[in-house]
Image (spheres, rainbow, N blue to C red):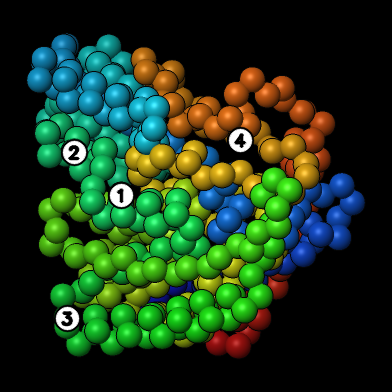
C-alpha cells in the first residue's frame, strides 16, 4: 500500500493533517479554560511572525589536522551571514577536528556513519543535532555557501511574510504539466475562497493608540526542482519529512508562515480543498498556543530582516522567553538569537515560565489521550 504524507508524514508513524489540526485546536481550547494559562486570540500566523524567533540550524565543519585557507574564507562567509545586523541567517557552525574529537561522541552526534572523505560541512535541522542524522553532508564550495546563505525565492518568500502575507504557499512543481496545472488551479481556487472569507471579518489589533485591521494574504510562490540557485531551499523542504523523496513525480505545496516556518507538506492526491481549508483555518484561526514547541512545523533556513516587523499591542502580558537548544558555543554568535528589542536586557520572569510549562505539560497529556482515542477508532474502523 502506498504511504501517504499529509502535513506531518507517514500514516503508520505520524498523524494525518486533520488530526494534527484537531489536536492543536483541542490544546488551544484547553488553554482557554485553564486558570492562569497565558493564551491569546491572535491569528497564529501573526503571532508567529511577531513573537517566534527562528530556530537555529546547527552544524559542524568536520576536518582533519588543519583547515585550508580557502575553506576558512568560506566558513567566515557563513559566520558573517549568521551575525548580520539586518538579515541574520539562522545557522550556527563550529569547527571540529576529527582526529582530536572523541570517536564515540562523534558517532552519537551523527546518529549514523561518519563521512570518510574530509573536510565536510554537516548541518542538522533545528533541535536534531545528536538525535537524528544530518540533512546535509557536503564538501564546502562557493556555490554551497551561496545557496545556504540566501537565494532569490527564499528572499521573495521572506519579503512577502514581512510585508504582511498571512501564509506563503511554496509550490514545488513535479515536471508533469497536466498534474502541475491541475493542482495549482485547485490551490488558487481554495486560497481565493479563504482570502474572501477572512477579509470579511479581519482581526483588529491595537497599534499604539490606533485600532488597526489585520489584513490577510495567501500568495503562491512557485519553485522548480531544476533551479540550481534554489537547490538548498528545495532540499530543506524535501527533507523536512522522511518520505517526500518517494513522491518526486507529484506536485507539492508547503504552507510557510511566521518567520519562515513550514507547517508541513501536501502532495499529489492530498492536495485537496479540505486539507487546504484545514491549513488556512488553523493558521488564520483566533486560537493559538503561544509556546512554539507545541505547534507543528519546522523553521526553514532563511536570512531575513524579521525585526522589521512592528510589534503590535494585541496582548498585554510580557513576551515569553525563548527556549534555546544545547550546543557548544560558536566563535561568532548569530545575531538572530537575541536581536529583538523586547529581549535585549529584559529580566527573566521564571514564575511566568513555570505557569507556561505546567499548562504545556497538561496540554501535551491531553493531546496524547485524544490521539490514542482517535487512533484506536481508526484501527477499529479498518
**Residue at 61% of width from left, 52% of height from top?**
47
The residue drawn where x is 67% and y is 49% is: 207
Q: Which of the marked residues, 1 or 2, is nearer the chain's N terminus?
A: 2
C-alpha gap between disc 2 and disc 4:
29 Å
Please tell me which of labels 1 and 3 falls first in the chain.
Answer: 1
On residue 176, which mark appears? 3
Residue 371 visible in this rendered orientation of the protein:
no
Disc 4: which residue: 322
Q: Residues within 10 Å of mark 3 (few under 14, many from 20)?
A: few
**Whether residue 235 is situated above or below residue 356 in the rendered picture:** below
Tags 3 and 2 touching, CB below 8 Å: no
The residue mark sitting in front, 1 or 3, is 1
Q: How far apart, in angstroms, are the residues tagged by discs 3 and 4? A: 43 Å
The earlier-in-sequence mark between 1 and 4 is: 1
Q: Residue sitting at 39 percent across and 68 percent down?
A: 219
- Location of mark 2 (residue): 146
For the question of whether residue 302 can be seen, the reply is yes
- Residue located 16% across and 15% down the image: 67
Q: Which residue is mark 1?
A: 155
Amino acid at each position: 500500500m502506498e504511504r501517504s504524507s499529509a502535513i506531518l508524514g507517514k500514516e503508520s508513524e505520524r498523524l494525518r493533517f486533520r488530526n494534527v489540526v484537531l489536536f492543536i485546536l483541542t490544546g488551544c481550547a484547553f488553554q482557554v479554560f485553564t486558570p492562569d494559562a497565558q493564551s491569546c486570540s491572535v491569528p497564529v500566523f501573526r503571532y508567529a511572525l511577531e513573537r517566534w524567533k527562528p530556530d537555529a540550524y546547527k552544524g559542524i565543519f568536520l576536518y582533519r589536522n588543519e583547515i585550508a585557507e580557502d575553506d576558512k574564507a568560506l566558513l567566515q562567509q557563513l559566520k558573517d551571514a549568521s551575525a548580520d545586523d539586518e538579515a541574520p541567517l539562522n545557522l550556527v557552525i563550529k569547527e571540529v577536528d576529527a582526529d582530536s574529537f572523541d570517536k564515540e561522541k562523534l558517532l552519537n552526534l551523527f546518529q549514523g556513519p561518519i563521512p570518510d572523505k574530509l573536510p565536510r560541512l554537516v548541518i542538522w535541522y533545528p533541535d536534531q543535532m545528536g538525535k537524528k542524522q544530518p540533512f546535509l553532508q557536503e564538501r564546502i564550495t562557493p556555490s554551497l555557501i551561496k545557496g545556504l546563505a540566501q537565494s532569490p525565492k527564499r528572499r521573495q518568500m521572506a519579503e512577502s511574510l514581512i510585508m504582511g502575507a498571512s501564509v506563503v504557499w511554496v509550490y514545488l512543481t513535479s515536471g508533469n504539466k497536466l498534474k502541475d496545472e491541475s493542482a495549482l488551479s485547485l490551490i488558487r481556487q481554495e486560497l481565493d475562497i479563504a482570502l474572501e472569507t477572512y477579509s470579511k471579518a479581519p482581526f483588529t489589533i491595537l497599534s499604539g493608540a490606533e485600532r488597526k485591521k489585520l489584513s490577510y494574504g495567501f500568495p503562491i510562490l512557485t519553485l522548480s526542482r531544476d533551479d540550481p540557485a534554489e537547490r538548498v531551499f528545495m532540499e530543506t523542504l524535501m527533507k523536512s519529512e522522511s518520505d517526500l523523496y518517494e513522491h518526486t513525480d507529484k506536485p507539492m505545496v508547503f504552507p510557510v508562515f511566521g518567520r519562515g516556518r513550514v507547517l508541513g507538506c501536501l502532495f499529489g492526491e492530498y492536495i485537496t480543498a479540505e486539507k487546504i481549508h484545514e491549513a488556512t483555518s488553523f493558521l488564520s484561526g483566533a486560537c493559538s498556543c503561544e509556546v512554539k514547541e507545541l505547534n507543528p512545523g519546522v523553521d526553514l533556513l532563511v536570512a531575513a530582516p524579521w525585526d522589521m516587523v512592528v510589534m503590535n499591542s494585541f496582548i498585554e502580558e510580557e513576551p515569553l522567553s525563548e527556549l534555546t537548544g544545547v550546543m557548544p558555543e560558536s566563535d561568532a554568535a548569530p545575531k538572530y538569537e537575541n536581536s529583538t528589542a523586547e529581549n535585549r536586557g529584559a529580566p527573566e520572569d521564571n514564575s511566568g515560565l513555570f505557569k507556561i510549562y505546567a499548562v504545556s505539560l497538561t496540554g501535551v497529556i491531553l493531546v496524547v489521550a485524544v490521539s490514542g482515542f482517535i487512533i484506536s477508532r481508526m484501527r477499529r474502523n479498518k
